[in-house]
Image (cartoon, rainbow, N blue to C red):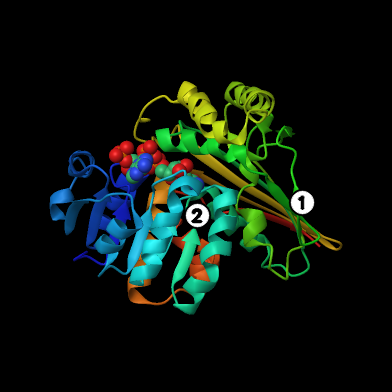
Amino acid sequence: MSTKPVVVYGASGYTGRLICEYLRELNVPFVAAGRDKDRCQEVVGRIPGIETADVDIVEVEHTVEALTDLFRGASVVCNTVGPFIRYGFEVAEACLATGAHYLDTTGEQDWVMAAQERFGTDFADAGLLLSPGIAQMYTTGEIAANIALETPGLDTLDVLVLWKGFPTYASTQTIFTILKADWFHLQENQYVKVDPLSRWDVVVPGRHELGLAVPWGGTSHPVWFKNDPRVANVTVAGGVMNRPVMEAVVATTAAVESDVKTLPRDQWDDALAAVADQWATGMPPRENPRLNVSVDSVHASGPLGRKHVVIHGNSNYKQTGLLQAWAAMSLLQQPPLKAGFASGCQAFGHRQLLGVLRQFGLVLDPVVTEHR
Ligand SMILES: NC(=O)c1ccc[n+]([C@@H]2O[C@H](COP(=O)([O-])OP(=O)(O)OC[C@H]3O[C@@H](n4cnc5c(N)ncnc54)[C@H](OP(=O)(O)O)[C@@H]3O)[C@@H](O)[C@H]2O)c1
């Protein structure tokens, strides 16, 4: 049973810790939970100023029963235990059983779709928010897209999301877990499969050097805009701002297609985990805003208009931590704008979320150019 209104599950991880940091700054009492109490204690205990936070540290087993016991009494759960297509179901199930809003940090299109299908109606009926993916990938780009869509008559979104930094252990596992799934863009309001071997040279706003981007699992944007009457088409390219790394991602994706996806299905998980382990580099250093930058760029177009919105930011894991903590804080004070399955912008408003990121120095004012 939680004696605090917010539970951060996965608090021993890189992103869980950042959510805890921002909950402290927002003065929200919380439970820092994970499968290993000592690890949670060690990680959370190193947060500067943690002695001023109202926090309990709790060990919990990853089962619906144990998570349900823990979440009872809480209003919001921030889940950072990914890959979510592997570990998310139990957590969402426990939220539903206890009447807690569910937030997570996923960037996995297949999990976003699965969560919508399996839990969307039940969360809506209970008046609870089910928001997989309140995170830099892809909430910041969703903010840019919604700023573009403030101009009526633009129905096509061409999105680019890039960041500079090192993925964490779970992020790396996640990036490779996504390779199991089919990936989709949106064409005339219908999902269309994307070739996993697609690669694009992209013009990165603010740079002369071309970037290399890939479908990055399809991303959440096609799902968020599927039932948006303003939007018919969504394509997304993403990756990290490091061309040699992206060349290696392309080569690894090709190897997975030829060497892993040709194995019997029950062998894929182990084979993919082995590939991911080759990439794992341990816990990345704390982000440095001079080095760890992000760019979210959206070209929106329609027959009689064009608009380009760019959000330059920094510290994409910190953006994620802040967005989660702020969303949790907001849910303690008022209901979401939309209950059930909803994106960050649908639940809290894109201008509001932009303001939060600006308030903490994590993004610049968007650069907007428009022709009509
Ligand atoms: N979309 C975005 O922009 C964005 C941003 C940040 C993170 N993410 C995603 O969020 C997830 C977490 O990332 P992270 O940076 O926090 O990774 P991390 O540092 O590797 O932390 C992962 C957390 O999950 C826990 N965990 C792993 N396997 C578990 C299991 N079987 N049962 C219970 N707990 C388990 C870990 O516990 P232990 O410490 O005990 O191992 C740890 O607390 C990843 O899927 C990542 O892709 C996405």
270 to 349, vertically: above or below: above
x and y percentages locating residue 248 in the rendered image: 61, 22
Task: Point out the quarter of the image occupied by ligand 1.
Answer: top left
Please tell me which residue is depicted at 58% across the width and 54% down the height of the picture. Answer: 366
- Secondary structure at badge 1 equals strand
x and y percentages locating residue 126 in the rendered image: 44, 77
The residue at which mark 1 appears reads as 192
Judge depth for marks 2 and 1 and give the one in front.
1
Q: Tell whether 210 sits left or right of 342.
A: right
Distance from mark 2 CB to nearest ligand 1 atom below 8 Å: yes
259 to 16, vertically: above or below: above
262 to 301, vertically: above or below: above
- From this viewpoint, which residue is outermost toward the left? 51
Q: Tell whether 254 sits left or right of 93.
A: right
- Secondary structure at badge 2 equals loop
The residue at which mark 2 appears reads as 133
- The reply to whether residue 212 is visible in this rendering is yes
For badge 2, the amino acid type reads Gly
Q: Tell whether 112 sits left or right of 64.
A: right
- The reply to whether residue 361 is visible in this rendering is no
For badge 1, the amino acid type reads Val
Mark 1 surroundings: few (<14), some (14-19) or many (≥20) residues within 10 A: some
Q: Quadrant of residue 247?
A: top right
Residue toward you, 253 or 299: 253
x and y percentages locating residue 228 in the rendered image: 68, 68
Mark drawn on residue 102:
none
Please tell me which residue is depicted at 37% across the width and 57% down the height of the picture. Answer: 78
